[in-house]
Amino acid sequence: MKNSEIHSVVWKGDAVAARDVPFATISDHLADESSLIWVGIRNPNAQIFEQLGGELGLEPAAIEDALNHVERPKAVRYGTYSFVTVYAAVEQPPVADNVEQDEELALAKVSSFVFPRGMVSVWYDDRFGFDEIIDRWNETGNLGRHGSQMLVHGMLDYIVDGYFHRTQSLDDEIEELEDEVLEQHAGTTRGLQRRIYRLRKSLVRLRRAVVPMREVVASIMRHRRETDGDPSLDPWFDDLYDHSLRAAEWADSLRDLVTTIFETNMSLQDTRLNIVMRQLAAWAAIIAVPTAITGWFGQNLPYLGFGQDWGVWASVISIGLVSVVLYWSFKKRGWL
């Protein structure tokens, strides 16, 4: 089992006042109206959650949702805090050239307990981290004024931006795939089918993370109105909701596009198969002519020109003439 890591940042106003404070002081910082704290726990175990629950008074249902590795994105309001679960798109680790990845997309579950003066985040995927999110918090500022709502917005905004980045990568790959489908050769058909299947699978996974994000942001906005949150942040969350909506629509359009590419690829394969069958049928008809004539003249019965040299030439000329006529006829129809 991976070792747990605990990091924290404390702000006074908009400036960082401390980092990696003792675990036992988290509740003190959360109760301090003059400070704002973020705590990040990577690979938490049951013991850490037990200490965290006792320290912060977390509900068992919220702890269970955070421990569960398969949980639908959601935002739930409890008595003194909110619980938010989302999935971030992360980069797949590089693989060898001769190894194919089963999926183009990986998701990392991120859960956060949001208090008025702080946020505690937990996640299990080592490919995800909060370093860039912390930099974004520091660059944006307004932490002392808006409190934990700025932390929530910054985290979700970073994750939604990751959706756009990953969707753009999939979009670029789909464009390349479109060209390959139209220009493919017989030997590349199987590889294209595998790539199309992986892209469809990745887009389905991405959609499962992106579409519920709209509900998460909408729930947070509704909770803010119910708790008389600072109205100056409403445009920020409205913009975040619009971004999540655009990301969901983009993912849906790409999924439909991949489905169209898959159907087009199957139609092209059927068309190529029909062409091959027509060519085989045409050549079979041409070959049948000399077979029929030589078979007829090979019978042990007298026939026109039997035992004469000109009979042989008549059969050869007949074979050549009929074969040429059939070839020209099939070529004119595009069968050859």
Image: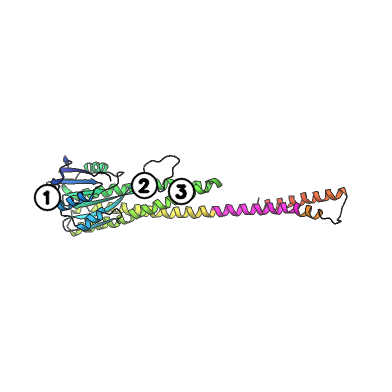
Q: Residue furthest front?
A: 1
Labels 2 and 3 touching (C-beta < 8 A): no
Q: Nearer the viewer, mark 2 or mark 1?
A: 1
Nearer-N-terminus badge (2/1): 1
- Distance between the alpha carbons at the discs numbered 2 and 3: 16 Å
The stretch of residues the image draws in magenta is 268-291
Q: Which mark is residue 44?
A: none
Other-residue count near label 3 (Cα within 10 Å), few / some / many at <14 / 14–19 / ≥20 = some
Nearer-N-terminus badge (2/3): 2
**Element assignment for label 3:** helix
Is 287 or 158 nearer to us in this picture?
287
Q: Which mark is residue 31?
A: 1
Q: Position of residue 10 (x, y in %)?
A: 16, 43
Other-residue count near label 2 (Cα within 10 Å), few / some / many at <14 / 14–19 / ≥20 = many
The residue beneath circle 3 is: 195
Residue at 51% across, 48% down: 190
Q: Is residue 100 left or right of residue 37?
A: right
**Element assignment for label 2:** helix
The residue beneath circle 2 is: 166
User: Disc 1 residue type?
Assistant: Ala
Residue 50 lies in the magenta-colored region: no
Q: Is residue 185 left or right of residue 225?
A: right
**Element assignment for label 1:** helix
Q: Position of residue 81 (x, y in %)?
A: 18, 55
